Image (cartoon, grey):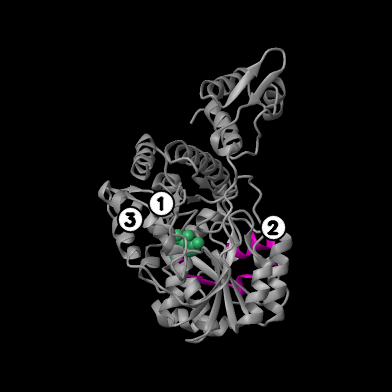
């Protein structure tokens, strides 16, 4: 991508996500050129590109100003208070069909929260992999028992320390992805019949794991901007014997919500008071559009109630299956459970990720991909608002790459899902994000890919809804 396109894309992301508000002035050509050490003609070319796209306007003798986009000016999504709901998890059959469609390359993939494979650092990784296999072929033939590769655990610990969390390599066990980490945390921290607090809506695989372990959930309302309703969390603890909670504090799935720091602190305090495990899924934490990495819940935990689960599946690549867990007080149980499950994580892939992180390429890569995702989320949000019927509302995530869409009253996302399958479009209907079949008039759309074909698929969905 040329330099002027990069500059244009950066401002496009800011305008579409509302970071630059309609009517706000962009930096002058001269100041941007001076601050960035780029030529004035590069800045001018970037601004002209944005002007041609209708995103900014030139005002004589005054400068360039951001214009209003639909996504930036629409009313932010508000959800009705559905209250607290306790019971076993219902797992709809649709999930299995969605996974099947997710594997079918003939489908437009707006359902699974995966990025376009070209957005992952695949070229750099393939070079590192070839080098690693050439220099250390014996790694292919070696087991690496839990807790796993020390070089990678050091790198992960270093990143948490930089965020202000106390973390050493010894605190970490490597896993085969984040789902496995969630499974291990729940298995060690609960027993069948226990109750687990979840956000409503929440990530459907977490609900499936809870179901598979014979656990019950208490669904607690979660705001699409700020996450869990803390008053409702307190009420849930008063009414039910909660043993653990599963929370996605940073750019939650499906809404993209980001919990403010004071809410994170309070949430940790509540769980500590009730001596319940707080399992955080921080898989999207590295993908803030602002470039400011939000704090994980463990930053606010001095008593060891937070169990942090995450992986490189949304950053380095889901195919590597490399994740991790900070098991808090459950280290030994989780380490032996991980061994019993599948022996450990392959050395060849963990060495590869360690090489990538040690080379310093990860940080540079993250800066680029965050910007790219901000633009994709904004473009897809815009396309949805243009194509879907009047009355559609959409969440405005500040990171990650999923949006939560509320359809106008009376429309069913399950009906839409079925019609979309016939049109070879895969979407995630809202009901799968609830343990009790809530959110029939919501869908989650993945913004992991953008192309003209994706834009047409969104128009098609709009046509089906209308
Ligand atoms: C919130 C969340 N947690 C966990 C996962 C699964 O991660 P992994 O592929 O590392 O198991 C996903 C994948 O979509 C996710 O969205």
Q: Nearer the viewer, mark 1 or mark 3?
A: 1
Mark-to-mark CA distance, 2 and 1 = 32 Å
Q: Position of residue 230 (x, y in %)?
A: 68, 67
Q: Report the span colored magenta.
A: 155-177
Question: Splitting the image into 4 quarters, where does residue 221 fall?
Answer: bottom right
Marks 2 and 3, the one that precedes in the sequence: 3
For label 3, the crowd category at 10 Å Cα-Cα, with few meaning under 14, some 14 to 19 and many 20 or more, is many
Q: Position of residue 199 (x, y in %)?
A: 56, 67
Can residue 350 be seen by looking at this rendering? Answer: no
Ligand 1 within 8 Å of disc 3? The answer is no
Q: Are marks 2 and 3 in contact (CB under 8 Å)?
A: no
Q: Is residue 420 magenta?
A: no
- Name the residue tied to disc 1: 411
Which is nearer the eye, 195 or 189?
A: 195
Q: Is residue 159 magenta?
A: yes
Q: Residue at x 60, y 24 (%)?
A: 56
Can residue 197 be seen by looking at this rendering? Answer: yes
Q: Secondary structure at mark 1?
A: loop
- Name the residue tied to disc 3: 102
Vertical order, 110 against 161 (above or below): above
Which is nearer the eye, 68 or 411?
A: 411
- Name the residue tied to disc 2: 260
Ligand 1 within 8 Å of disc 2? The answer is no
Q: Residue at x 49, y 80 (%)?
A: 216
- Direction from residue 332 to residue 229 in the image, left or right: right
Q: Position of residue 3 (x, y in %)?
A: 55, 28
Mark-to-mark CA distance, 1 and 3 = 24 Å
């Amino acid at each position: 991508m040329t330099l002027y396109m990069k500059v244009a894309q950066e401002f496009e992301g800011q305008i579409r996500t509302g970071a630059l508000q309609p009517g706000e002035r962009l930096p002058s050509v001269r100041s941007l050129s001076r601050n960035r050490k780029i030529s004035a003609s590069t800045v001018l070319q970037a601004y002209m590109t944005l002007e041609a796209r209708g995103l900014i306007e030139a005002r004589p003798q005054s400068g360039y100003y951001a214009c209003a986009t639909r996504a930036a000016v629409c009313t932010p999504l508000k959800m009705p208070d559905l209250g607290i709901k306790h019971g076993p998890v219902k797992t709809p059959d649709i999930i299995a069909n969605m996974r099947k469609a997710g594997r079918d390359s003939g489908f437009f993939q707006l359902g699974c929260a995966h990025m376009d494979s070209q957005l992952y650092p695949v070229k750099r990784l393939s070079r590192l992999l070839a080098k690693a296999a050439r220099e250390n072929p014996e790694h292919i033939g070696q087991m690496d028992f839990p807790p796993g590769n020390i070089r990678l655990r050091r790198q992960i610990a270093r990143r948490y320390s930089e965020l202000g969390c106390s973390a050493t390599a010894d605190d970490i066990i490597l896993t085969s992805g984040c789902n496995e980490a969630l499974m291990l945390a729940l298995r060690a921290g609960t027993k069948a019949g226990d109750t687990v607090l979840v956000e409503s809506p929440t990530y459907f695989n977490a609900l499936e794991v809870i179901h598979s372990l014979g656990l019950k959930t208490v669904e607690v309302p979660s705001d699409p901007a700020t996450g869990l309703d803390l008053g409702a969390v307190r009420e849930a603890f008063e009414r039910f014997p909660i043993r653990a909670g599963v929370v996605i504090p940073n750019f939650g799935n499906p809404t993209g919500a980001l919990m403010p720091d004071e809410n994170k602190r309070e949430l940790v305090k509540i769980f500590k008071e009730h001596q319940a495990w707080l399992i955080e899924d921080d898989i999207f934490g590295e993908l803030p559009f602002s470039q400011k990495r939000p704090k994980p819940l463990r930053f606010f935990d001095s008593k060891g109630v937070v169990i942090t689960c995450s992986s490189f599946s949304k950053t380095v690549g889901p195919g590597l299956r490399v994740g991790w867990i900070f098991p808090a007080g459950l280290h030994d149980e989780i380490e032996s459970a991980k061994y019993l499950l599948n022996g450990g994580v392959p050395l060849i892939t963990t060495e590869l990720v360690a090489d990538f992180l040690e080379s310093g390429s990860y940080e540079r890569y993250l800066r680029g991909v965050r910007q790219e995702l901000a633009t994709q989320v904004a473009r897809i949000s815009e396309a949805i608002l243009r194509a879907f019927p009047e009355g559609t509302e959409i969440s405005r995530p500040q990171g990650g790459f999923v949006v939560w869409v509320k359809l106008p009253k009376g429309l069913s996302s399950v009906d839409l899902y079925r019609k979309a399958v016939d049109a070879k479009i895969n979407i995630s209907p809202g009901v799968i994000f609830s343990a009790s079949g809530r959110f029939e008039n919501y869908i989650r759309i993945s913004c992991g890919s953008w192309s003209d074909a994706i834009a047409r698929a969104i128009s098609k969905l709009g046509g089906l809804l209308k």
